[in-house]
Amino acid sequence: MRKYLSFFRIRFIGGLQYRAAAWAGVVTQFAWGFMSILMYKAFYNSAPESFPMEFSQLTTYLWLQQALLAMFMPWLFDSEIFDNIISGNVAYELCRPCDLYNMWFVKNAATRLANTVLRCIPIIVVAAFLPYPYNMSLPAGWVQGILFIVSVILGFSLLVSISMLVYISAFYTLSADGIKILTVTLIEFFSGAVIPIPFFPDSVQTVFHLLPFASLQNTPFLIYVGYTIGSDALISVAVQAFWLIVTLVAGRLLIKRAVKKVVVQGG
């Protein structure tokens, strides 16, 4: 365990060095957040009773989305891992006295968390002091707050485990670009990153919730704003745990098989 904590600490500290990029990201996310809120405001003004969420809930959802963007953005991949696999330098990784899957998992988690720490606090602080209903509010209740924390951890772990499947696919393909583009597109659409899932028809939402992508940012954010409550919230968290176990097991089985068959050219 100590060696994985070392990998995590090194990657996390390294990620904290890019402060200028983080501040640029914060400015961009503020601009995007305001544009999204104003766009939805125009729709709400036309027919407020026809939307499934209160506008104050939606604004909190959107600010959470921006504050935790680095944690849940699907396009954040570690190019070093892909380069090592394609170039054959993964042979050096296999010589390390540690589990390859665990090492890559903690490195990816550390990178995302470092970016999140740098960006989320300024966004949350500023969004909290905006005038109602454009501000980011507190959780709907203390139970919602606890479930939100649990759900965020599960959703974050699930996204990293899905990313691990994309990395492992590079063992079986000449280029992982196609799989990366497909995965990012699916996650962006089915996780509620483009349009919150409650805004879709009920029949479509049923399909969305059967997929693992809805268990990413959609579940914790809807719990936070009080849209998903009671037994529905507990079921949503249980679904997150289910998909996390499925993707972790699938990733371990695939990487075990890939490592047994990997061939490194050269000498």
Image (spheres, helix red, strand yellow):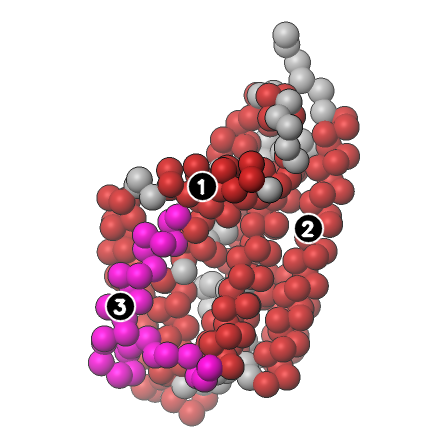
Type of amino acid under label 3? Val
Whole-number angstrom distance, CA of label 3 to CA of label 2: 35 Å
Specify the label residue 248 is tagged with: 2
Specify the label residue 125 is tagged with: 3
Mark 3 or mark 2: name the one nearer the start of the chain: 3
Quarter-of-image position of residue 174: top right
Look at the image and give the residue range highlighted in magenta. 114-142
Foreground label between 1 and 2: 1
- Indicate yes or no whether the magenta region holds residue 199: no
- Indicate yes or no whether the magenta region holds residue 119: yes
User: Quadrant of the image for the N terminus?
Assistant: top right
* Direction from residue 122 to residue 257 in the image, left or right: right
User: Quadrant of the image for the C terminus?
Assistant: top right
What residue sits 69% from the left and 45% below the top? 251
Mark 3 or mark 1: name the one nearer the start of the chain: 1
What residue sits 64% from the left and 61% below the top? 212
* Direction from residue 133 to residue 92 in the image, left or right: right
Quarter-of-image position of residue 263: top right
Q: Which residue is mark 1?
A: 9
Whole-number angstrom distance, CA of label 1 to CA of label 2: 22 Å
Q: What kind of element bears circle 1?
A: helix
- For this orientation, the residue located farthest to the front is 2
